[in-house]
Image (cartoon, rainbow, N blue to C red):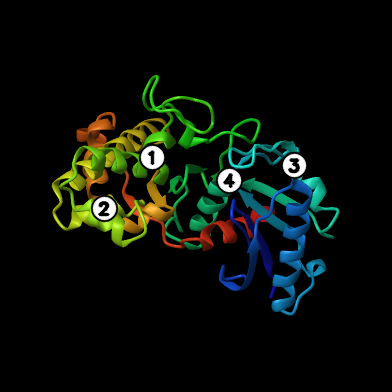
Amino acid sequence: MQYRIGIDLGGTAIKVGIVDETYQVICSHQQPTVEGFELVVADMAETARIAAEKAGLRLEDFPSVGVGSPSCINPYTGLLVFSNNTNWRNMPLKQELEKHIPVPVFIENDANCAVVGEMLAGAAKGYRHVLMLTLGTGVGGGLIINGRLFSGGDGMGAELGHTPLVAEGEPCTCGIDGCLEAYASVTALIRQTEEAMSKNPESRMHAHAAAHGGVSGRTAFDCARKGDAVAMRVVDQYCTYLAAGIGGFINIFRPEIVLLGGGLSGAGDTLLEPVRKKVEQFVFAHDIIGAPPIEKAALGNAAGTIGAAYLGDI
C-alpha cells in the first residue's frame, strides 16, 4: 500500500497525519508551534519523522510531503507570502523544508487543503464544482472547479474570507476593512456577542459565559437554542452576514455544493437552516435557477491533513 503524509501548520500546533490509499488517517503526531521560522521548519520535519516512525515508515518511503498553512501561499514558488498570525512575509517554506525532508514538498493554503480532502473522501465526494468556507478564528475558503483546485493565475487566489462584504466596515487582520472574515469568523461572532451582552444585561448569555470560562463562538448559538431573545438576534445577524457572502460566491461560481467547516460548523442546523433560507435573497434568479445545497463538511480537522497529503497527486 502507498501512503501519503500531510502536515497542518497551525498557529498553535503542528499536526502530521499518515494517510492510506482509502484516505484514512492511520496515525498522527503533533507538537506545539514555537516562534521563529527556522525553528518551526525544523519542528515540522521532526514531527513528520515521528509520525512516519509510528507507522513503521521512513520519510524516504513517501512519494512527497504536503503542507497546509493558514497563510497566503504561492505553490509555484514555494513561498509563504504572508501570514496574518505570524507576520511572516516571503518565507521560503518549501525550500527550507526540503533541506530537512528527503522527498518533494508541496505547500498550499489550509482551506485549499480542506476542500481537496472533502472532495476526495468527505461531503464533496462525487462533485466537480465545490465551494468551501472554514469558519474559525478567521474565514478560509477553497474552490474546486471542474474537479481541480482553483487558486488563480498566480496560485494565491480564492481568498474568500477577504472578499469585501461591507464598505468601510469592521477592520480585518489583513489590513482591509469590511472583509467577510471581519463579520463571519469566530472572532467576529465573539465581538458581536460581547457587544449585544453589554447592551442587554438581562441576557442569559452572561450566565453562560460565566459558566464556560468566558464568551466563545458557542455562547450565542447555545443560548439561542434555549430561547434567549438577545442571543437569537445575534445569531440571526451573524447568519445574514454569512449568507450574504455565500450568495455572492454562488453568483460568481455556481458550485454544485457549498460546504461549511471549521469550529462554527459544529452549530449544525442552528447555523445551516437559517443560512440556507437567508442565502435565497442574495442569489441571482433564485426563484428560477435555485441555489446549491449548503452542507456541513464531513471530515473535521482530518480534511486538511488528507488534502495536504495528496497535494502531489492533484
**Measured from the top left, where is residue 212 in percent x and y?**
33, 61
Q: Is residue 222 left or right of residue 14?
A: left
Amino acid type at image mark 4: Pro
Residue underneath mark 2: 221
Q: Is residue 274 left or right of residue 267?
A: left
Q: Earlier in the sequence, mark 1 or mark 3?
A: 3
Q: Earlier in the sequence, mark 2 or mark 4?
A: 4
Residue underneath mark 4: 70
Of residues 151 and 126, the one nearer the viewer is 151
Label 2 close to label 4 by CB (< 8 Å): no
Amino acid type at image mark 1: Ala
Label 1 close to label 4 by CB (< 8 Å): no
Q: Secondary structure at mark 2?
A: helix
Residue underneath mark 3: 78
Q: Nearer the viewer, mark 3 or mark 2?
A: 2
- Determine the residue positioned at 21% across, 37% down: 199
- Determine the residue positioned at 62% across, 51% down: 68
Q: Gap between marks 3 and 4, in whole Å? A: 15 Å
Q: Gap between marks 1 and 3, in whole Å? A: 31 Å
Q: Gap between marks 2 and 4, in whole Å? A: 25 Å
Tell me where residue 57 sits by quadrant: bottom right
Q: Gap between marks 1 and 2, in whole Å? A: 14 Å
Q: Is residue 21 left or right of residue 238?
A: right
Label 3 close to label 2 by CB (< 8 Å): no
